[in-house]
C-alpha cells in the first residue's frame, strides 16, 4: 500500500535545527522508508510502547522520525530527533520516551 506523507508544523520546526544536508537525509529517508509499508515493522520501522510522542519510529542513521497515521493511507510525521548513544535529542533538548 502506498502512503502519503505529511509533516506537522512541529516536525518541520524540528528539522530546522539540523543542517541542510541532514534535513535532506531525513526527508529522503522518510520518503524511501514510509512511502510503502509504513505500517509494517522492519529493521528501520518499529512500533513503540505507549508514550506521549508517537506510536511509531523510523530510524535513519542517528536520526529518529516519529509518526502516526491520520487515515489508512496518510502518514503524519510528528517529530524528528537525533539519537546519540542511548539519548534522544529534539531541538537540542534531551527527551525521554
Image (tube, rainbow, N blue to C red):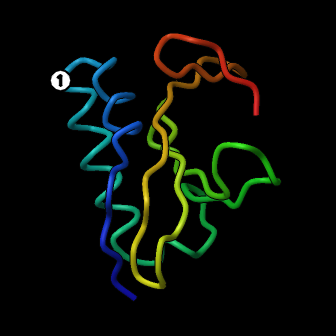
Task: Pinpoint residue 50: horizontal percent, then vertical percent.
Answer: 81, 53
Q: Nearer the viewer, residue 72 or 45?
A: 72
Mark 1 residue crowding within 10 angstroms, few (<14) / some (14–19) / many (20+): few
Residue receiving disc 1? 20
Q: Quadrant of the C terminus?
A: top right
Residue at far front of view? 9
Q: Is residue 51 left or right of residue 66?
A: right
Instruction: Judge from the rendering whether residue 4 lies leftward or rightward of residue 76; answer left or right.
Output: left
Q: Residue at the top extreme? A: 92
Using the image, determine if residue 49 lies above or below residue 96: below
Q: Quadrant of residue 53?
A: top right
Check the image and name the residue furthest to the bottom: 1
Does 51 sit left or right of 22 as displayed?
Answer: right
Relative image position of residue 42 (x, y in whole percent): 60, 65
- Say which of 5 and 37 sits in front: 5
48 shown above or below 23: below
**Please, is residue 77 above or below residue 84 in the view?**
below
Task: Work out which quarter of the rendered image holds the N terminus and state it.
Answer: bottom left
Element at label 1: helix
Residue 52 image offset from top left, x and y in percent:
73, 43
Give the residue displayed 41% in from the left and 36% down from the top: 10
Say above or below: 49 vs 19: below
Q: Residue at x 29, y 59 (%)?
A: 31
The tally of labels here is 1
Q: Residue 15 location in percent, x, y?
A: 32, 30
Left or right placement of residue 44 versus residue 15 in this view = right
Tell me what residue is drawn at x 52 percent, y 38 percent.
64
Amino acid at each position: 500500500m502506498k502512503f502519503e506523507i505529511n509533516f506537522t508544523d512541529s516536525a518541520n520546526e524540528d528539522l530546522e535545527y539540523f543542517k541542510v544536508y541532514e534535513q535532506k537525509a531525513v526527508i529522503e529517508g522518510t520518503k524511501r522508508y514510509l512511502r510503502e509499508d509504513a505500517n509494517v515493522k522492519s529493521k528501520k520501522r518499529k512500533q513503540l510502547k505507549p508514550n506521549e510522542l508517537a506510536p511509531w519510529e523510523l530510524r535513519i542513521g542517528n536520526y529518529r522520525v516519529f509518526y502516526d497515521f491520520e487515515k489508512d493511507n496518510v502518514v503524519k510525521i510528528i517529530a524528528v530527533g537525533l539519537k546519540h548513544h542511548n539519548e534522544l535529542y529534539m531541538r537540542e533538548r534531551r527527551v525521554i520516551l
